[in-house]
Each structure stands twice: as structure tokens, then as C-alpha cells.
Amino acid sequence: MNKNYKMFKKKKSGKGMKKLYRSSSNRIIGGVCGGIGEYFGVDPTLIRLIWVFFTFVGGSGILAYIICWIIIPEEP
């Protein structure tokens, strides 16, 4: 059987797919940056620094954080 077909079938069935959650163990305020860091396999401190940068440069960081805090579910 074709290897690409097996990968497609696995993705379509939902097995092995990661889900984005707010971190319960790696949180400072709401766990948003910790959850994003865990999802992408990056240090959450780097995500926090990027978030602070966008807050000071564009001003949209605080609003985006609040929206993510509301939308992203808590880690089970």
C-alpha cells in the first residue's frame, strides 16, 4: 500500500493529531504561551518574549492574549 495513503488515512481518522491546550503546569497568567510552546515544541519563554514584543510594537498582543485565553481550552 502507498505510504502517503497510510499517512492520509491516519490524519483523517484523527489518531496521532496534537491539540492545542492552555498549559496547566507551565503558566504565568493564563497558560496561553505555555500551551503554544508545548504545542510547537518550543521553550515557552521564547513565545512570551515574542508576545511581549508584539504588545509593545503593535499593541495587539494584549487583545490577542485575552482572545486566546477565552478560545483555547484548558489542558485536561
Image (tube, grey):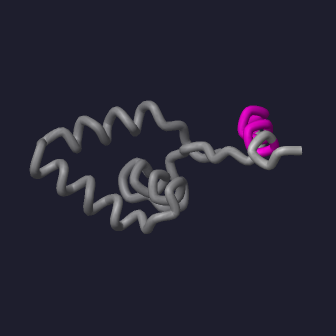
Horizontal and vertical percent position of residue 59: 13, 42
Residue 5, compared with residue 46, is above or below; it is above
Name the foreground residue: 5 vs 48: 5
**Span of residues in magenta:** 6-14
Name the foreground residue: 1 vs 64: 1
Q: Residue at x 42, y 32 (%)?
A: 70
Using residue 5 as the reference point, say whether residue 61 is left or right of it.
left
Name the foreground residue: 71 vs 28: 71
Horizontal and vertical percent position of residue 53: 18, 56
Horizontal and vertical percent position of residue 7: 75, 45
Residue furthest to the front: 2
Question: Can you say which quadrant of the picture contains the C terminus?
Answer: top right
Q: Does residue 7 belong to the magenta stretch?
A: yes
Residue furthest to the right: 1
Q: Residue at x 81, y 43 (%)?
A: 6
Using residue 65 as the reference point, say whether residue 20 is left or right of it.
right
Horizontal and vertical percent position of residue 60: 18, 39
Q: Residue at x 79, y 40 (%)?
A: 5
Using residue 48 as the reference point, say whether residue 37 is left or right of it.
right
Q: Does residue 58 belong to the magenta stretch?
A: no
| Image quarter of residue 74 | top right
Question: Can you say which quadrant of the picture contains the N terminus?
Answer: top right
Q: How many marks?
A: 0
| Image quarter of residue 4 | top right
Q: Residue at x 48, y 37 (%)?
A: 72
**Majority secondary structure in the magenta region:** helix
